[in-house]
Image (cartoon, grey):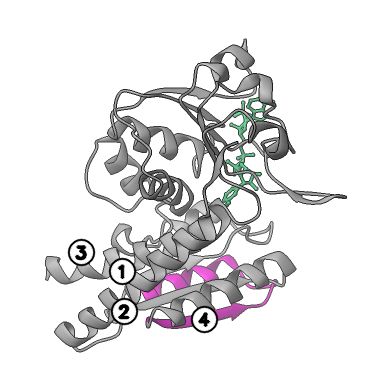
Amino acid sequence: MAKIIDGKQIAQNVKDELKVKVQEFFVKNNRQITLAVILVGDNPASQVYVKNKIKATEYVGMKSLSFYMPATSTQEQVEETVKSLANDDTVDGILVQLPLPKHLYENKILSQIPAGKDVDGFLAENVGNLMLGQDTTVACTPFGVLKMLKSSGVELSGKNAVVLGRSNIVGKPMAMLLLKENCTVTICHSKTQNLEQVCKNADILVAAIGKPEFVKANMVKEGAVVIDVGINRTENGLVGDVDFNAVKGVASQISPVPGGVGPMTIAMLLENTYLCACRRNNAK
Ligand code: NDP
């Protein structure tokens, strides 16, 4: 039976370690690390995410600035808010909660965030740096998956890693991170053929496709490590992209949903904010 990778506990450890580092930063620099969060509109799920992010920011001793803008905000108004935070030297990180209301151009708004304050790691400059193997801000979810693997003592170098999904925020950066760790990486998507066999060859399988319990036991190699990024709301509650009950009988380690990757994403957002603050300080 697979060992369960406890994302909640690993995330708690990350936050507790950050608490100490954030306090040290304050003592050394005489200022609080600050994360600005912008929420446009009243999407209930986004409201919950933002509330949790603010709570976690304050838990580690960072300052949070929140900007709640009405759904009717214009492109100019949202861009101006981002620009003013971009020019504010006391702000270390800027997060625009997605999705934005449909009438707003997401890319144009995000592009107002300077790469050094892009705590989500979504901007082309940060994605490009990751591709070049340089020190940069990495998207929180794949960054969290890597932290989970390392914290669980998973040997990465030389291993076959299969990433299911090629989105810009999960699949692609995940593959780049695993490549940097010397895995042999295969990226799969909706047009991949012989998916079962490809998955069966994985020592490390990361599922990020958004299809409830898609990965079955017959797709997993005996002893593989399986990380489930998926979050799917079904009538049976929240489930991942992996058939957890079946796959745990085959894998050596597996992350659950909920309590796996989800909590890591917020913890790595805080880690990214801390790293952005340190890089900005070093650049001065
Ligand atoms: P996207 O919808 O942007 O991407 C899904 C990817 O899965 C696409 O590349 C798609 O292929 C691929 N895919 C879809 N169906 C199949 C299939 N049958 N076989 C193989 N590949 C397939 O999703 P995200 O990357 O944003 O998110 C993926 C999942 O992770 C979702 O459940 C999401 O809720 C969750 N998530 C969880 C987070 C967390 O904090 N735990 C954070 C972010 C996401 P193609 O490109 O060909 O269309």
Q: Mark 1 points at which residue?
A: 274
Q: Nearer the viewer, mark 1 or mark 3?
A: 1
Amino acid of disc 1: Tyr
**In the image, which disc is placed on residue 33?**
2
Q: In which quarter of the image is residue 262?
A: bottom right
Q: Do the residues labelled 1 and 2 touch (CB within 8 Å)?
A: yes
- Disc 3 or 4, which lies upstream in sequence? 4
Q: How far apart are marks 3 and 4 (CA)?
A: 23 Å
Label 1 secondary element: helix
- Disc 2 or 4, which lies upstream in sequence? 2
Please name whichever residue, 125 or 103, is drawn nearer the observer in this view of the structure. 125
State ligand 1's quadrant.
Answer: top right
Q: Distance between the residues labelled 3 and 2?
A: 12 Å
- Was residue 92 drawn as part of the magenta stretch in this picture? no
Q: Where is residue 133 in the image (x, y as percent from the top left)?
A: 24, 38
Amino acid of disc 4: Ser
Would residue 196 appear left or right of 82 to someone viewing this image? right
**Part of the protein shown in magenta:** 62-86
Mark 3, ligand 1, within 8 Å: the answer is no
Q: Nearer the viewer, mark 4 or mark 1?
A: 1
Label 3 secondary element: helix
Q: Position of residue 79 (x, y in %)?
A: 48, 68
The residue positioned 33% from the left and 61% from the top of the image is 114
Q: How far apart are marks 4 and 1 (CA)?
A: 18 Å
- Disc 3 or 2, which lies upstream in sequence? 2
Position of residue 172 relative to residue 33, above or below, is above
Q: Mark 3 points at which residue?
A: 279
**Quadrant location of the N terminus?**
top right
Q: Distance between the residues labelled 2 and 4?
A: 14 Å
Q: How far apart are marks 1 and 2 (CA)?
A: 7 Å
